[in-house]
Amino acid sequence: MAVDSPRPLLTGAKALVVGIANDSSIAYGCAKAFAESGADLAVTYLNEKTRGFTEPLARELGAQIYAPLDVARPGELEAVFDAIRGKWGRLDILVHSIAWAPKEDLQGGLLDSSADGFAQAMDVSCHSFVRMARLAAPLMAEGGTMFAMSYYGANKVVPNYSLMGPVKAALEACCRYLAYELGPKGIRVHAISPGPLKTRAASGLKDFDILLNEAVQRAPLGELVDILDVGYTCAYLASPYARRLSGETLYVDGGVNIMA
């Protein structure tokens, strides 16, 4: 007697992934893992400059919604959620994988960061997740899962991570508070903390290659993680197998975080 293959973990789930810049993006790894797991995708691109890189990826992923989104531009975030409401009428998964700070603030020390640069970094990298959650929650009437991408430098000092350390610490705290506020609605919220990855955003950090080499040396597994490692973790956490997990900061780093 033939046995039917089990359905993918996320069959029919509706997922919005924000932050794909190219095929090295953590957001792309998440989108790819969700697609493999049976989810329908909505993905965004920052502007016309990035569209040439992201549109082929959206086609490859079979994204049903592909829309511009610069969270600093009024109305664009609302337009994305209007499109989701019109196309699907609901949302099950949200991935926030964007971060930004002015280069001069990012490459200097925290002590020398400007008030304006710090505020911009906090708005784009942190508070935009709160705004997304506010718009996503009404579409998650039957529950859902939200993710934001953090880094080890939120909890321990990582040389040259500069003002992004306090910004990511704030983002992790937002995830915990949102998990508390949205829990009664069946919505789970997690911060994901990947190890160092060769992404476009990370390339802006001073001496980033040193971070990569140190991560390999310190990881109990002895190797770097990749974007699909992050994606598969998120796919599991969005599935019924993780239905009682919320408010966690999950490290996807080969074990680096356990080392003294």
Image (cartoon, rainbow, N blue to C red):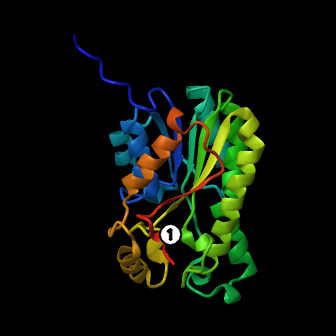
Density class for disc 1 (Cα within 10 Å; few <14, some 14-19, many ≥20) is few
Give the secondary structure at mark 1.
helix
Query: Residue shown at 62%/81% (left/top)?
Result: 105
As drawn, is 124 to the left or to the right of 204? Answer: right
Q: Position of residue 167 (x, y in %)?
A: 67, 69
For the N terminus, give its image quadrant: top left
Label 1, on which residue? 258
Q: Is residue 245 above or below residue 141?
A: below
* Residue furthest to the top: 1
Front-most of residues 122 and 73: 122
The answer to which quarter of the image holds residue 186 is top right
Front-most of residues 22 and 109: 109
Q: Position of residue 123 (x, y in %)?
A: 70, 63
Query: Residue shown at 69%/45% (left/top)?
Result: 133
Q: Is residue 52 visible?
A: no
* Residue furthest to the left: 1
What's the residue type where badge 1 is placed?
Answer: Ile
Q: Is residue 194 above or below residue 237?
A: below
Q: Position of residue 238 (x, y in %)?
A: 53, 39
Disc tally is 1
